[in-house]
Image (spheres, rainbow, N blue to C red):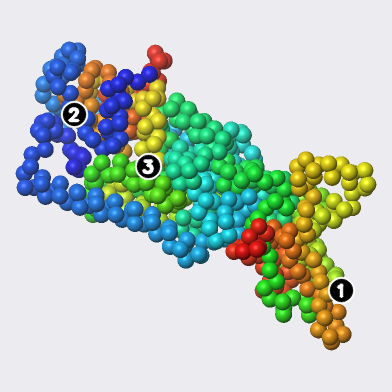
Amino acid sequence: MADVGYIKDSLKQLFGFKVARPTKEQQSLALKAIYAKKKGHLSKAEMDAVRREHKGTFLNKWQKRRWLSLIFVNLLFVISYYFDVQLVEGSLTGARVIGFHMADLNSALQIALAYKHIVLNLVIGMLSVFVLWMLLGGRTFCAWVCPYHLLSEWSEYLHLWLAKMNLVKDHSFNRKVRGVFYVAFALLALLTGYTVFDSISPTGILSRALIYGPGIALLWVGLLLLFEIFYSRRAWCRYVCPIGMTYGMVGVFSPVRIKYNAEACHHEGDCRKVCLVPHVLDLTIRGGALDVNQDVASDCTRCGMCVDVCPTDSLTYEIKGLSKMLK
Amino acid sequence: MAYPMNDDKPSDKRVKKQLTPKRREQSRREFMRTSLLTVGVLGVSLLGYIPILQGSSMRLRPPGAVKQPNDEQAFFSSCIKCGQCVQVCPVEAIKLADMPDGFGIGIPFINARQQACDFSCDGLQCVLACPTGALTHSLDYPADTRMGFARLAHPKTCLAVQGKGFKGPARGADFTGLLRYAEVDRWKPIPVANHPYDLALCNLCVRQCPIEIRIAQCAAMPEEDQQQVARVAQQVGNECPPKHAISMETVDYADGIRRMKPVVQDGCVGCGVCEMICPVEQAAIVVDLDKNADTLGG
């Protein structure tokens, strides 16, 4: 389903390494012809005209659908609990959906390393979740289900607004630190015998708070959000969260992807400005792609912000194997 | 490196990172920040050890919890903090712990004084609901559980020891705890506040002990069913609790007052109903966590 290059690029990006810019030899002739046609780049005025002509106002189509999905899934848990409807029981870390066991992969991994024993129901839960997110896109979980992601996104708007007024600055971290955290949390579980990461995971804390009631743990989540507003944009999701890493690796095999088409692209980078993981969109830089059509690698959360914002519709959802394209 | 926000100059991207003094400084700063972030986040995550070492995270756990008295590490590490056990308990005895419990956050516990586990689910539903085996399926009946062990902590305040009776709702009219009274409703637990007592000599802990109630039910079964019970008990080993959990024994202070006191027996599972139902302001009988029926000998 995925070719070796795609898998390699995905894993490299997940662990914080830059994918090397393709050499002229690696690029397809068709792509090189397209790049050659676009020798100069558009001025700011021309670019603004393109944006106005093609999109008019900012569409937010996929963003609306995504927020609805996120709120719906979490609400389903809350309603199931309060009205004792046995549709969806538990929380995001472990649930039964109409009786089917589902276990968050990262939580299950923490248990496997700390408790060093996995019962059958947990194996079933892991398999269900693995298959589900392998089909839907791995980090699709992040953008379409994770409650922290939504709060973090709202905080991001706040951060950008403050940054426009020069009140805050975005401080980046080295992206390789996410791989370091991944290994560190795994080792901590193994060596201490406690699920260390799960005790600070904002995903679990928020999911439980929504269902079972608020607690002091929300102060920790608040602290993370303040950090993201005033110091480093989307820091937790970008530089720390091992849940995203786990699902990112699962998504390497997924047929659901964002596809980039270089023909009409102006390489102005509007997509990279809104992306949670802009390194996956390096291929939209002029000279950065391998072929006219190329899939965005698997650190992508399939959030569709780039699809919404692109003034030339060069980024679209696709399900590999289905010839029709989703718009 | 900070991701370029402005792409008006795509040519910058083509040039490999030049080690200008400014770049080197930025790179160094980023490295420092990243190191601090790593130490910071991992440090915060390890703060979870503190309540464990202090012992303040130790609590009464749902039946079947894979814990030893004084060591909850196995339970903490196997629990996926999903809360399915919370949802399934008919008296809502189970709650999930908060951040002050450190590594115990999100892990189910019971506050017996507020709401004890009375086994009114009739089948250890929490155990059945648990997807990871943190509440182990290796037990079948309430008498198998080892949640803790009761103890008459304040005998002087015990009403029975004082020779006193009890009249009215066991914990007052405002108490929100639930208990299943089989003679009132076989299936549904009712508020303790709706079930007042009128006793000449208080024996609430013994009277409401779920293990004692089950033993009495087994004893009351007609002859034919007794044989059935024996067969089932033989096959499964423990449908009827094999040992008594608590009984009243006479206390003689040689002052003519008829006194009794509850004595906890080997079959106590530590469910906490006695602690919940004790009418005294500070419960005279409590559940200890540092021992259970299996560790009594030491």
Which residue in the structure is indicated by mark 1? B200
Which residue in the structure is indicated by mark 3? A242
Residue drawn at the location 77% of the way across and 53% of the way down: B241
Residue drawn at the location 76% of the way across and 45% of the way down: B237
Question: In terms of sequence position, does the residue under pointer 2 or pointer 3 come before the other?
Answer: 2
Residue drawn at the location 93% of the way across and 43% of the way down: B224
Quick one: SS at disc 3?
A: helix
Question: Quarter holding the N terminus of chain B?
Answer: top left
> Total label count?
3
Q: Chain of mark 3?
A: A
Give the alpha-carbon distance from disc 2 to disc 3, as whole Å.
24 Å
Quick one: SS at disc 1?
A: loop
Q: Chain of mark 2?
A: A
- Where residue A316 appears, as percent x and y from the top left, is 34, 23
Q: Are marks 1 and 2 in contact (CB under 8 Å)?
A: no
- Residue A243, located in which quarter of the rendered image? top left
- Where residue B149 appears, as percent x and y from the top left, is 67, 63
- Crowding at label 1, few (<14), some or many (≥20) Cα neighbours within 10 Å? few
Of the residues shown, which amino acid type is indicated by label 3?
Answer: Pro
Of the residues shown, which amino acid type is indicated by label 2?
Answer: Ala
- Residue A275, located in which quarter of the rendered image? top left
